[in-house]
Amino acid sequence: MRVIIVGGGKVVYFLARQFASKGHKVTIVTDNEEEAGAFSRRLKATVLPGDGSDPGVLEEAGARRADVVLALTAYDQDNLAVCQIARRWYLVPRTVGLINDPENEEIFRKLGVSVAFSATQIIARILEERADFEDISNLIPVAEGGVTVSEVVLRTDSPVVEQELQHILFPEGALLGGIIRDSEVIVPRGGTRLLGGDRLIVISESDCYDQLLHLLTGEESE
């Protein structure tokens, strides 16, 4: 399968690594040249610096032969444009778009994006479906237990409380998927400041979970 991923960050890195490990041909398009260099060194993937919503860049990435295009940038308008161009210009059979603002979900679906997903909505559904949420630490084991989606409640004395996310060095195999604060779901940004009582939805590989737990709580796992 030929996969084009437009975007950057750890989610793109993990996805590209996973696809490549299964033998798929992966091309990443990112507008961050420094990140493009890092991806090139660490992944078995073709990496193209540029704007994925530019038809010429998508064509250079191989859109005419792609089986699926994933648009995973932080901007809904860009993700929608990538999916539209991939489908209408290059007849890509399957497009996947990340929705950062849940209010845009209907627009994505009406305009024919094959799969449109919102991390905020996913976390909200977990809250609605699990009445005993406070007693849950490991929510969803995936990849045969190699990756876990977990909840970590920050105490007021946590070493990361009052810090902005951009200043917190998460382990290589860990990602913050969302923050639940006073029943509100917050999409994490670089300038988001963590507060005592926040519930963090974290995605981590099993071999870095202890390191992640120590970072967020200051405690060693048993």
Image (spheres, rainbow, N blue to C red):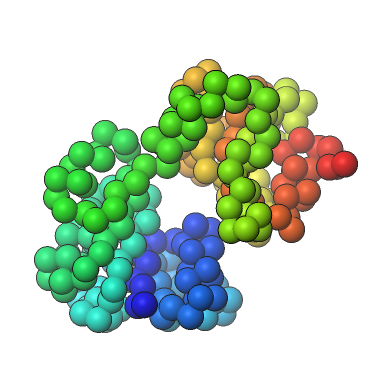
Looking at the picture, does residue 55 appear above or below residue 188?
below
Query: In the rendering, at what x and y percent does residue 45 appear?
Result: 47, 79
- The quarter in which the N terminus is drawn is bottom left
Seen as rendered, the residue at the extreme front is 144
Query: In the rendering, at what x and y percent does residue 155 appear?
Result: 73, 25
Residue at left 43%, top 65%? 32
Looking at the picture, does residue 216 appear above or below residue 145?
above
Viewer-proximal residue, 112 or 170?
112
Viewer-proximal residue, 13 or 189?
13
Viewer-proximal residue, 202 or 78?
202
Residue at left 58%, top 58%? 143
Residue at left 49%, top 57%? 11
Query: In the rendering, at what x and y percent does residue 203 appear?
Result: 59, 48
Direction from residue 158 to residue 33 in the image, left or right? left
Direction from residue 136 to residue 96 in the image, left or right? left
Can residue 75 be spotted in the picture?
no
When asked about the image quadrant of residue 52, the answer is: bottom left
